[in-house]
Image (cartoon, rainbow, N blue to C red):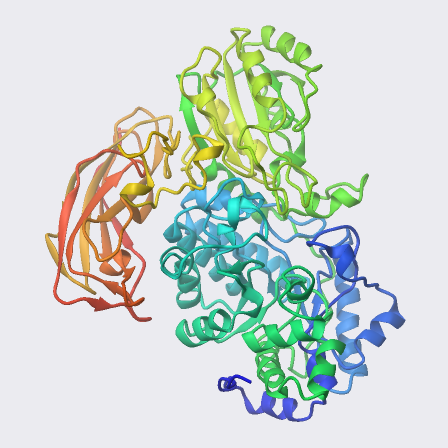
């Protein structure tokens, strides 16, 4: 039996409470209890377990206490104020009727806002990445956290820090982007906002989940240790070091043959000992039992529990399938050392102490008399985030549209509020199992929002998101011929495990638009009426036919990644010029299905070259996005040399040379010219959102730590090596602009926890706008 690492440091109160516990009371603290299971919201949910909410059943299940209550608000539509009253009473019952009187941690999903009925629906994380605005994401997360706190929720199962590798994977819309630095900075901001509101954030999925083979959910991961350390770990490192995240969730996948849920090197040696994580590791739903039923690693649930507990999973979610009776039997048979249980229990009790659950007055006060989960503040933040995340991919001058236009609003996503919401929104995650129940919040569709602008509009879907029915094409074509412009809104329907075209379990073999949507766009374009194509999707699709000037190509293309409850209104404003697009692609726009997996962070031989006849170059690169104005970058000045482990300055002037106000996302890139291992041809070093009036110039100074060029050397140590690095500012990752060279000098620098990894910037006005 392996040696158990030292127990966590805890207070005298926690130590005393732990000393009183029986084995059954300890195990009860390490599991969740699912109060309601109503429809499939987790993989293999029906096959794995069942639960109920009857008072007798609940009392029996919690007679020894309970660690977590699973999704009190997020499994079926419940009135939030009434449910909060029930929860307060239930927590008081736990204090009164269990021997040790310890309340439960309540956890919920909060990836696109709190996944509960009547709660605000924010843009999906891929939209966070497209905004390139960590400050706004932090504010949105704080508002989400404040709602959760009012409801008596303690822990949020977000953010997802998986780095996108293959857009065929169904869970792309839950991710922030394909660049580790963008994922890390934006994800860390979300952690900071949520925890500023008193909610413990849960980083997921640790680690490498998004590299699952061929973009198939739960498939094996074949990434090597250097790629894991260079690409997949940095967002977690940042969220732990700078965000002080309190919880981590394991990945479902097996990394080089070892499931993460049973990987001691991953969950204990790396996470706790090397990265310094001091919080609680929770299992992804059913992943402990999956070691038995899906991955063939365990002989039964007790064996699965032993493997997971010893590896470092402290809490089994969503239920106690493995950590209760099966684990108890193993411990009493002498097959599992109870000290592993003690380690986990001490972590859980410390977390409950941090959350105030061990305080004598916990739940003594009444919950709020009325709880509003969709306040004007929520809507304002959702609107701003939606607006900042929409990416203009092409524009032949058709946008912005003139006022009072006659608009044919066409397409399967033109007049559906579900099309604006991601996989983990309450509507698509839960309400799909409750037909007839209203969403509970106002979510104007694109058609609704255009109606409100005063334009004359006609609406026809033309086709469904999926399927091959083209009988609606004739009505769409007729509507387009009678209009000044056709706005064709296409894309995805998010859902889970076969419900929809994208989302958890909805992986795809093809990156063509689902169904006959391309044919619809082409039929409408063939009328000669100017066409704007709007994409509401959870992944990037192959769009060369729409972007490269073909005879039936739309005049403009707008990409929105599930922009949330205010997404329709944000799109209407952009279409009519009330605001200007400023989103940038957080993931490359793919050339073809067969070019995947592809990422811009590739070495020379990972992209196009003379040794291959097959192009993988994206149709639109990472960081791409147009505006209604134009920007110029000039006078790049970079320090000539810097010590390894030090920092250098890079300065650039950015000017709005157009006749409209706008926002430029200034992107600083770099390349390690020669290193001891292959390095990417370009990597994002830092970025800044810079609003500029027409004619205005600003001088930006980026302070760049050389740790941004860190790599895992042949000793498997993270270092900064001496040598030349190139630095440039571009409009996107493939902008062919002039580069400056910085010479990193001195000995090799081993990168430690104290090394700063983020780029800071400051702005000085050079000239005012016109």
Residue at image location 68% in from the left, 80% down from the top: 361
Image quadrant of residue 342? bottom right
Where residue 304 appears, as percent x and y from the top left, is 65, 71
Q: Is residue 340 left or right of residue 139?
A: right
Residue at the image position 60 percent from the left and 74 percent from the top: 307
Residue visible at 32% across and 38% down in the picture: 607
- Quarter occupied by the C terminus: top left
Q: State the quadrant of the N terminus.
A: bottom right
What is the tally of numbered marks visible in this picture?
Answer: 0
The relative height of residue 351 versus residue 759 in the rendered view (above or below) is below
Residue found 66% across the figure and 18% down from its top: 462
Q: Position of residue 747 (x, y in %)?
A: 14, 67
In the image, 362 versus 323, the foreground residue is 323
Q: Confirm whether residue 318 shows in the render.
A: yes
- The answer to whether 726 is drawn above or below residue 481 in the figure is below
Q: Residue 752: x and y, percent?
A: 30, 71
Q: Do we see residue 102 in this rendering?
A: no
Q: Position of residue 644 (x, y in %)?
A: 18, 63
Compare residues 696 and 277 and report the one nearer the observer. Answer: 277
Please, is residue 743 above or below residue 195 in the view? above
Extreme residue in the left direction: 640
């Amino acid at each position: 039996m392996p040696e158990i690492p030292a127990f966590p440091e805890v207070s005298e109160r926690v130590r005393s409470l732990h000393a009183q516990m029986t084995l059954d009371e300890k195990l009860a603290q390490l599991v969740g209890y699912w109060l309601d299971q109503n429809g499939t919201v987790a993989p293999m949910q029906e096959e794995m377990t069942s639960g109920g909410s009857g008072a007798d059943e609940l009392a029996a299940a919690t007679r020894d206490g309970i660690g977590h209550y699973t999704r009190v608000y997020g499994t079926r539509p419940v009135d939030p104020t009434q449910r909060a009253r029930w929860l307060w009473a239930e927590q008081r019952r736990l204090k009164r009727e269990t021997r040790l009187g310890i309340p439960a941690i309540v956890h919920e999903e909060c990836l696109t806002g709190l996944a509960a009925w009547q709660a605000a629906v924010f843009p999906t994380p891929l939209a966070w990445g497209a905004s390139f605005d960590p400050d706004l994401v932090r504010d949105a997360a704080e508002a989400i956290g404040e709602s959760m706190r009012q409801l008596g929720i303690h822990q949020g199962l977000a953010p997802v820090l998986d780095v996108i590798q293959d857009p065929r994977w169904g869970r792309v819309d839950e991710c922030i982007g394909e660049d580790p630095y963008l994922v890390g900075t934006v994800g860390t901001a979300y952690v900071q906002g949520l925890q500023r509101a008193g909610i413990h954030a849960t980083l997921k999925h640790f680690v490498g989940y998004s590299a699952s083979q061929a973009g198939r959910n739960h498939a094996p991961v074949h990434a090597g240790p250097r790629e894991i350390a260079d690409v997949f770990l940095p967002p977690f490192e940042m969220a732990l070091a700078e965000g002080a995240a309190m919880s981590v969730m394991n990945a479902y996948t097996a990394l080089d043959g070892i499931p993460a849920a049973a990987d001691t090197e991953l969950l204990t040696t790396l996470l706790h000992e090397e990265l310094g994580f001091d919080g609680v590791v929770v299992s992804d739903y059913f992943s402990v039992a999956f070691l038995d039923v899906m991955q063939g690693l365990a002989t039964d649930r007790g064996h699965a529990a032993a493997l997971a507990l010893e590896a470092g999973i402290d809490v089994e979610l969503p239920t106690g399938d493995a950590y209760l009776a099966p684990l108890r039997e193993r411990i009493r048979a002498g097959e599992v050392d109870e000290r592993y249980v003690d380690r986990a229990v001490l972590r859980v009790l410390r977390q409950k102490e941090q959350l105030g659950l061990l305080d004598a007055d916990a739940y003594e006060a009444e919950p709020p008399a009325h709880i509003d989960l969709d306040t004007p503040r929520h809507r304002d933040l959702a609107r701003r985030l939606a607006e900042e995340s929409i990416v203009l991919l092409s524009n032949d001058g058709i946008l912005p549209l003139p006022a009072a236009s006659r608009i044919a609003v066409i397409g399967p996503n033109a007049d559906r509020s579900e099309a604006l919401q991601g996989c983990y929104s309450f509507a698509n995650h839960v309400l799909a199992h409750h037909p007839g129940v209203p969403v509970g919040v106002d979510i104007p569709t694109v058609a609704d929002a255009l109606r409100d602008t005063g334009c004359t509009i006609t609406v026809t879907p033309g086709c469904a998101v999926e399927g091959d029915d083209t009988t609606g094409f004739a009505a769409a074509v007729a509507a387009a011929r009678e209009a000044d412009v056709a706005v064709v809104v296409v894309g995805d329907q998010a859902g889970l495990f076969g419900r929809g075209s994208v989302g958890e379990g909805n992986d795809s073999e093809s990156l063509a638009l689902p169904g006959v949507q391309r044919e619809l766009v082409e039929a409408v374009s063939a009328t000669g009426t100017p066409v704007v194509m709007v994409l509401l999707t959870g992944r990037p699709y192959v769009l060369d036919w729409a972007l490269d000037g073909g005879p039936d190509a739309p005049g403009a293309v707008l990409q929105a990644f599930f922009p949330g409850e205010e997404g329709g209104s944000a799109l209407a404003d952009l279409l009519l010029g009330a605001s200007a697009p400023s989103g940038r692609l957080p993931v490359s726009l793919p050339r073809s299905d067969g070019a995947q997996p592809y990422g811009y962070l590739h070495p020379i031989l990972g992209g196009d070259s003379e040794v291959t006849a097959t192009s993988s170059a994206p149709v639109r690169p990472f960081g791409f996005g147009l505006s209604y104005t134009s920007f110029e970058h000039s006078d790049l000045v970079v320090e000539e040399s810097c010590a390894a482990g030090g920092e250098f300055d890079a300065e650039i002037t950015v000017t709005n040379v157009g006749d409209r106000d706008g926002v430029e996302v200034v992107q600083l890139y770099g390349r390690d010219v020669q290193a001891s291992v292959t390095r990417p041809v370009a990597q994002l070093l830092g970025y800044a959102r810079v609003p500029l009036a027409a004619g205005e110039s600003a001088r930006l100074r980026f302070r760049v730590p050389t740790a941004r060029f860190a790599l895992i050397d042949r000793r498997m140590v993270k270092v900064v090596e001496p040598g030349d690095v190139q630095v440039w500012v571009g409009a996107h990752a493939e902008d062919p602009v002039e580069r400056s060279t910085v010479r990193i000098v001195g000995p090799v620098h081993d990168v430690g926890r104290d090394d700063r990894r983020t780029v800071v910037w400051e702005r000085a006005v050079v000239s005012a706008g016109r």
